[in-house]
Image: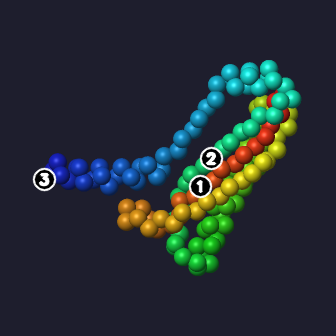
Amino acid sequence: MLRMTISALLLVAAPMSAIAQERVVVQSPAVTDIMSKRPNEIVRINVNVNFQISAAADLSDDAEKARENARRAIYEMAKRECVIILELMAQECRLESVNVNFQRQTHIQWPQGYAVNGSISLRAIPK
C-alpha cells in the first residue's frame, strides 16, 4: 500500500516539476573568440523561451490581460538580449523578429492557462 502511494505521488509530482524547470545555457569563451576572429561579419542569434501562465482559457478581460503581460515579458526579453549581446560580444545588435505563440492548457494535471512559446531572432556584428 505504501509503495502504491509513493508511486502515485511520484506520477503526480513529475509533470509538475517539469513545468518549473528552466534551462540555462552558458557559452564558453570560445564563442567570443570565434566572433572576434570574424569582425564585421553578421552573426545570427536565436533565443527561445517557454513558460506557462495561469489564467482562464477564455476571452475574458482577465485572460486577455494575462496574455498581454506574457507578450510584454517576451518583448522585454528581446530588448534585454540586445543589451547583453552589446555588452559581451558585439558592436551592433539588431532585432530581426519576435514570435509569440499561445497554446491553451486544459489538462487535469496542470492549472488552467496557457503555454507560452517565444522566439527572438537577432543579428549582431562582432566587436
- Residue in the foreground of this view, choosing between 116 and 40: 40
Q: Is residue 30 left or right of residue 63?
A: right
Q: CA–CA distance between discs 2 and 1?
A: 7 Å
Q: Mark 3 sits on what residue?
A: 1
Q: At x 51% / y 66%, what residue is drawn?
A: 104
- Choose the circle earlier in sequence order: 2 or 3: 3
Tell me the distance, in whole angstroms, between the alpha carbons under discs 2 and 3: 43 Å
Look at label 1 and name its amino acid.
Answer: Asn
Estimate the x, y position of residue 27 in percent, counting from the top left: 64, 29
Q: Residue at x 81, y 24 (%)?
A: 38
Tell me whether the residue at label 2 lies in contact with that at label 1, contact meaning CB atoms closer than 8 angstroms: yes
Above or below — where is 32 with respect to 8? Answer: above
**Residue at image mark 1:** 117
Q: Residue at x 72, y 46 (%)?
A: 121
The part of the image, by quadrant, that contains residue 110 is bottom left
Task: Using the rendered view, name the quadrant where residue 51 is placed.
Answer: bottom right
Is 21 left, or right, of 100 in this rendering? left
SS label for mark 2: strand
| Residue 21 horizontal side relative to residue 96, left or right | left
Which disc number belongs to residue 79? none
Q: Residue at label 2?
A: 48
Q: Mark 3: which secondary structure? A: loop
Counting other residues with Cα less than 10 Å from the Cα at mark 2, is it few (<14), some (14-19), or many (20 or more)? few
In percent of width and height, residue 35 lies at 77, 26
Of residue 66 and residue 34, the one placed in the foreground of this image is 34
As rendered, which of 84 and 114 lies closer to the eye? 114
Task: Please indicate, yes or no, whether residue 123 appears anywhere in the rendered image.
Answer: yes
Residue 87 visible in image: no
